[in-house]
Image (spheres, rainbow, N blue to C red):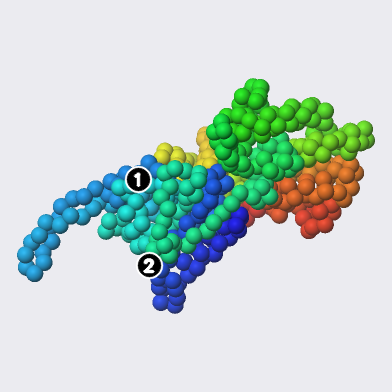
Amino acid sequence: MNIKEAKIHIKNAIAAYFQKDETGEYVIPVEKQRPVFLYGPPGIGKTAVMEQIAEEMEIGLVSYSMTHHTRQSAIGLPFITKKVFDGKEYDVSEYTMSEILASVYEYIEKSGKKEGILFLDEINCVSETLSPSMLRFLQYKTFGSHAVPDGWVVVTAGNPPEFNKSVREYDIATLDRIKKIDVEANYDVWREYAVNKNVHPAIIAYLDVKKSDFYIIENTPKGKNFVTARGWEDLSRMMSVFENKNIDIDISLIEQYIQSQTVAEDFSDYYETYKNLTAKFSTEDIVTGNWSEELSSELRNSAVSEKLGFINILSGEMSNVSKVAVNFNKTAKNVAELLKENQVISKTPKDAVNLLDNLINTFKADRGDKDIYFRETNEQKKEKLMVFEKLSEIRDILTGSEGETKIHISDFLKTEIEQLKNLVETAQTELSNTCEFLYKTFGESPELQIFISNITVNKYSSLFLMSFGCKKFSEISKSKFDENKVVDELSFIL
């Protein structure tokens, strides 16, 4: 199955494992909760999908790659303790808690999340000395005398032996105690992810035309040729940085990530076409509604690869402008809730500043805690940073103010609402103008449907539509995103 289908199966398994009866006991006993084993080729998104599941289910995630672990770090260190049997005292060997399990308990302490996923990647590549203990772990979910906490599901991942010489194949006794899910590369599924993650539009446009170049593993007389989803995504990040710094992107860079000379050369040639495309067509004219019929006609008569490339560019523009409004709205709402929860509004300026200092210091402490902070996603880190910056901005406004704090913070929040309205109006206008251009250029064609799909799949543009709507997009997509207003989500605190 593809990784999207596997994600559904994993979420269903976790939901089933978390189910409790009327006495508070797990319907499926902990010892019968089979660890999930994702089995498939490298670089298809196994790790990324675990982060998505944890975020969507609002549960914890602790992940480890097993390739670097020794028996001591995974199992713990032995120590001698004394126990009494039949009235006689004996020296008995026990083990300290392993680094892996200690990390789970530490995560629970710091995050407060009692349920989560312990994800162990490359599980079938462990060292020979560790292999027997890992097999026992898969069967009983214990390292030495210490068990995975109740409420935490074990999910593992591994590659078939043809992709990794270190792989140790499991016997039937082990396979009969795990929930094995075979996954394979699928471009259409990855494309949804890529649009959501703003993978470089040139890559998406190229692969839309040459899907067979998405994932390749082959042996040649000169060695292995391979192209993976991970390679395309990592290349995308580097391309974006190079473009921002005006550094040339050439075949030598592409070959570092796309390790098939034929595919690397083909994509390099297409990227030159893509650069010419961005110079030929102006996105600014389109989003502002100042495009000409000549521009529309020229795009309509362009090659398929050029059309797809430009549509992906426009989709990316819409994602970016939507992201600004969505993030502003979320940050302002989170800050407003913090102000209300901590009763900052009703305080004197001095007391309000002290409360804000406490909140700001809490955020600083979280960011300084490398263990817990490392295990947050990049998005969660950015959300915290935006709240921190907004609190600091409010504190600066209050410092040295006179009179009741309520006046100043209320005015600040009113300004926030007005700024949110302006951001939403800008995004709605640009999306409407883009929809108008594409509809008049292509009509109800596959090109228009690709744009609609990109907008509804992308996280930020879809969130924007659900929160604020866009009448023109609703018309061309025949959907119900037609709420052309801003809900004042901050009004409750004023």
Q: Secondary structure at mark 2?
A: helix
Indicate left or right for 224 with 214 as reference: left
356 vs 95: above or below: above
Indicate left or right for 151 with 146 as reference: right
Is residue 404 something one can see in this rendering?
A: no
- Seen from the viewer's position, the closer of residues 404 and 288 is 288
Location of residue 365 in the rendering, given as x and y in whole percent from the top left corner: 41, 41
Among the 4 quarters of the image, the one containing residue 297: top right
Residue at position x 78%, y 40% in the image: 308
Location of residue 271 in the rendering, given as x and y in whole percent from the top left corner: 72, 30
- The amino acid on which the numbered mark 2 sits, given as a three-letter code, is Glu
Dividing the image into 4 quarters, which one contains the N terminus?
bottom right
Q: Residue furthest front?
A: 221
Q: Secondary structure at mark 1?
A: loop
**What number is the disc on residue 31?**
2
Frontmost of labels 1 and 2 is: 1
- The amino acid on which the numbered mark 1 sits, given as a three-letter code, is Ser
- Seen from the viewer's position, the closer of residues 5 and 61 is 5
Q: Residue furthest bottom?
A: 22
Find the distance from the CA under tag 1 to the CA under tag 2. 25 Å
**What number is the disc on residue 127?**
1
**What number is the disc on residue 351?**
none
Location of residue 363 in the rendering, given as x and y in whole percent from the top left corner: 46, 42
Residue at position x 47%, y 43% in the image: 164
